[in-house]
Amino acid sequence: MTAAGTVLLVLAALTATAAWSRRLPLRARTALVLGAVLLLLAAFVLAAAAPDEAGRLRRLGVRVPLDAPQALGWLLVAWLAAAGGGPVAEVVLRLADGRRFWAALRGVRRAPRDGAATPPAAAPAAGPAPEVVVDPREPPRPRQVIRPGGLARARQSALVEEAARAHEVSRALEAGQDAAAQVLRGGAVIGVLERLAVAGALLAGAAEGVALVVAVKALGRYPELRAAGASERFIIGTLASLLWAAAAAGTGLLLLG
């Protein structure tokens, strides 16, 4: 395992671990995820170009024992696979939302929040009062008095009510779209265990273990996948998580020889 490859894997693991922080804004977490992906890609390219000395020894019949550096390398790959899959899956799921992701990334809000200032109402147009024609045959009606500025206040009240209705609609849409995410409870813990199992199976040379992991996860999630939008989130999140774990394990295999 080369020193440069080890440094890249450590940096990728640290970057992916930092992306778990919910205190960071979405833009910072997305940048950390992209950085972890680029670091893993650089480690993969470096490992593919490095000479395979251990592989040559195995082909010559010389047994290469798993020494301490290789054991630490396996642990590092497992850490990278477990830590990076969650933020990567989150970014991919947000990308699947399309415009919502880019609007959130730019900090654009589609509806005013509580306490937001409303645009000032236009002042009533100045000019002579309109002429009122009274029909003597019509019964008298209660007199309505419009004080100065009453039209402006009425228009401002209508704007406030319209903004409140728009905010309620936006909150309802967000609640409906986030309901599927709340259905899949415990996804973070299951995802970590899933990626550890996939990386371990690939490092051990038992690729069929990946199919077993996917089957067990799908069987356990089946009752919850009937909710609206849950099946799509399950497929997208699982594929992103598995691809990250497979990429980390493949890079580790190349670096470990």
Image (cartoon, rainbow, N blue to C red):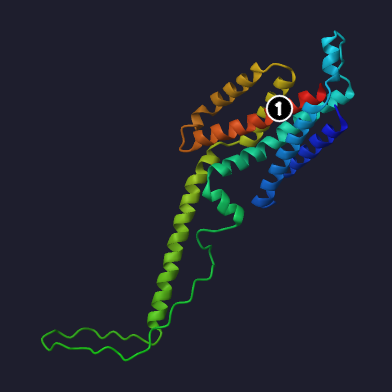
- 231 sits to left or right of 149: right
Task: Give the residue number, with chain letter if any, for mark 1.
Answer: 196
Q: Position of residue 199 (x, y in %)?
A: 71, 25
Residue under the point 69% across and 16% down? 206
User: Residue placed farthest to the top in the image?
Assistant: 61
Give the quarter of the figure containing the N terminus: top right
Residue 219 visible somewhere in the drawing: yes
Question: Which element type, helix, strand or loop, lies under badge 1?
Answer: helix
Which amino acid lies under the numbered mark 1 shown in the image of this protein? Answer: Leu
Q: Position of residue 243 (x, y in %)?
A: 64, 30
- 114 sits to left or right of 195: left
Residue sitting nearer the eye, 186 or 107:
107
- 43 sits to left or right of 239: right
Residue sitting nearer the eye, 225 or 130:
130
Q: How many marks?
A: 1
The image shows residue 188, relative to residue 68, as above or below, that is below
Give the quarter of the figure containing the C terminus: top right
Residue 193 visible somewhere in the drawing: no
Image quadrant where residue 220 sits: top right
The image shows residue 175, relative to residue 243, as above or below, that is below
Residue under the point 43% across and 75% down? 156
Residue sitting nearer the eye, 190 or 125:
125
Counting other residues with Cα less than 10 Å from the Cα at mark 1, is it few (<14), some (14-19), or many (20 or more)? Answer: many
Residue under the point 86% across and 11% down? 63
- 221 sits to left or right of 26: left
User: Residue placed farthest to the bottom in the image?
Assistant: 128
Q: Position of residue 24 (x, y in %)?
A: 69, 51
Q: Position of residue 213 (x, y in %)?
A: 62, 22
The image shows residue 171, relative to residue 177, as above or below, that is below
